[in-house]
Image: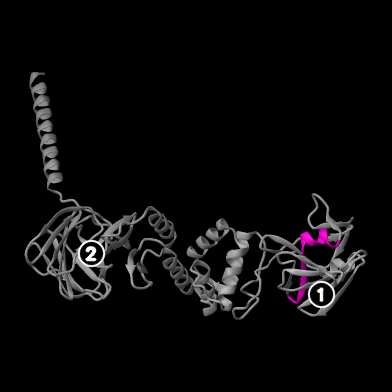
């Protein structure tokens, strides 16, 4: 019995030793494993940017590679100094150490290197690799990245900067004489001696929340919109926003006319013009409340895949105002016509249906004066179609003029009002206030567009 016990004890000891050995081996293997990361070195010279990426812990496999636009002088090697197998768009990595990929980029005119990193895709999925950036600047210009800085050393011929590890696609900016402010993933540059006010920051935050991450250069000489890069005069966020909206709408719509975006630009950045586009823009600003105008702007900023821009603009105006309109669809060029919204409820007088539409103009209701007057048993006469009209009631006679604030009472006295009558689709409409005051027709409480004689 004792030999058996000794054999079992010996077997258990051997098993325990094997477990300990396997555990230590696994621990050693785990400690030797390199986590996925990269060191990015950017050397900036006059007219050229040298980029070198060293990847650590890259898993073996075949990677699709996308280089920035304008890339040249591409090279690839391993830690062993052997050349790695890489084509223009693919890297075949079999493992065995770090991977070094270097290339050159031109310095663009706007002193912004927005897209400077290569992208690695494996099995159809982009590999997000944390990287540590080092910038060595050999030029007289000051270059920065919107990443938390770790060190900053200025030597005689080179400015050396290192930044903390990140996975964000941060741009490289020429920031001579400028400060940078980062809002989420957007970067804003401005003159050092002119701090950003809180109101400008709020305007930028509101705009960029809809426009998306971008580099915005303030205090520029002009307004310019490019993919991921914008400039504007001084601190004029309105001009930038207006230009971005019109550029976005042009790109998002398959059918549009230049006057559409001309009107939109005047809405959000009026320039004291007196043309028809400015007139239409004024109509939109006068028709919408501040909240409605802001809601409309957000809809324009977030628009995609627009088939017909005129239809889209009318539909979004309808959405924010709550009533239908054909302000853009009903014309082929800018015109000096009012922005009218149309109700879909019928009009009644003493319980009888009256033909015609009820309109809303600048948040006031208007009624088809001819049909309403005749339904009441009064007389309506067009003295000059589209210009002058006469209404005869049981008590008084009124003469109305389109686009004028005055009207004549009994051919001897004047009345004054704000837009008492308007013209829409060759029909004249009377404001609700005067339906009661002049015609003696009162609106029935609780019933939409139902009137009765006094």
Q: Position of residue 426 (x, y in %)?
A: 75, 77
Q: Quadrant of residue 307?
A: bottom right
Q: Which label belongs to residue 399?
A: none
Q: Is residue 325 left or right of residue 129?
A: right
Local crowd size for mark 2, using a 10 Å CA cut-off: few (<14), some (14–19), many (≥20): few
Q: Is residue 165 magenta?
A: no
Q: Quadrant of residue 183?
A: bottom left
Q: Position of residue 75 (x, y in %)?
A: 14, 72
Local crowd size for mark 1, using a 10 Å CA cut-off: few (<14), some (14–19), many (≥20): many
Which stretch did the figure color magenta? 425-439
Q: Are marks 1 and 2 in contact (CB under 8 Å)?
A: no
Query: Going 24% across and 70% down the picture, which residue do you hit?
Result: 90
The residue tagged 1 is: 389
The residue tagged 2 is: 177
Query: Going 81% across and 61% down the picture, which residue do you hit?
Result: 435
Is 311 located above or below residue 202 in the figure? Answer: below
């Amino acid at each position: 019995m004792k030999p058996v016990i000794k054999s079992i004890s010996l077997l258990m000891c051997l098993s325990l030793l094997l477990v300990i050995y396997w555990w230590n081996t696994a621990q050693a293997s785990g400690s030797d494993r390199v986590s996925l990361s990269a060191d990015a070195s950017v050397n900036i010279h006059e007219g050229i940017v040298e980029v070198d990426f060293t990847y650590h812990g890259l898993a073996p496999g075949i990677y699709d590679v996308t280089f920035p636009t304008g890339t040249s002088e591409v090279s690839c090697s391993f830690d062993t100094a052997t050349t790695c197998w890489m084509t223009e768009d693919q890297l075949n990595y079999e493992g065995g150490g770090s991977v070094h990929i270097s290339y050159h980029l031109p310095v663009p005119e706007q002193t912004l290197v927005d897209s400077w990193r290569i992208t690695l895709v494996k099995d159809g999925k982009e590999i997000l690799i944390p990287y540590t950036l080092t910038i060595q600047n050999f030029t007289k210009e000051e270059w920065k990245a919107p990443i938390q800085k770790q060190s900053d050393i200025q030597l005689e011929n080179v400015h050396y900067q290192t930044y903390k590890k990140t996975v964000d696609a941060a741009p490289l900016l020429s920031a001579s004489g400028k400060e940078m402010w980062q809002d989420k993933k957007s970067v804003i540059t401005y003159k050092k001696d002119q701090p950003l006010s809180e109101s400008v920051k709020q305007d930028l935050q509101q705009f960029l929340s809809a426009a998306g991450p971008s580099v915005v250069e303030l205090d520029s000489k002009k307004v310019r919109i490019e993919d991921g890069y914008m400039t504007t005069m001084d601190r004029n966020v309105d001009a930038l926003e207006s230009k971005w909206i019109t550029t976005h709408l042009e790109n998002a719509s398959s059918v549009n006319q230049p006057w559409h975006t001309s009107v939109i630009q005047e809405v959000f950045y009026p320039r004291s013009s007196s043309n028809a586009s400015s007139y239409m823009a004024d109509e939109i600003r006068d028709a919408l409340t501040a909240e409605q105008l802001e809601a409309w702007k957000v809809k324009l900023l977030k628009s995609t895949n627009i088939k017909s821009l005129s239809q889209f603009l009318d539909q979004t105006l309808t959405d924010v105002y709550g009533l239908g309109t054909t302000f853009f669809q009903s014309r082929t060029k800018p015109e000096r016509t009012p922005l009218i919204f149309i109700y879909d409820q019928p009009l009644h007088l003493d319980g009888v249906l009256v033909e015609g539409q009820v309109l809303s103009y600048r948040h006031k209701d208007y009624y088809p004066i001819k049909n309403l007057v005749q339904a009441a048993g009064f007389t309506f006469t067009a003295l000059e179609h589209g210009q002058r009209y006469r209404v005869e009631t049981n008590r008084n006679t009124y003469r109305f003029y389109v686009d004028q604030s005055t009207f004549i009472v009994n051919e001897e006295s004047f009345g004054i009002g704000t837009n008492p009558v308007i013209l829409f689709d060759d029909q004249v409409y009377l404001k609700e206030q005067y339906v009661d005051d002049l015609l003696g027709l009162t609106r029935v409480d609780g019933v939409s567009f139902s009137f009765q004689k006094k």
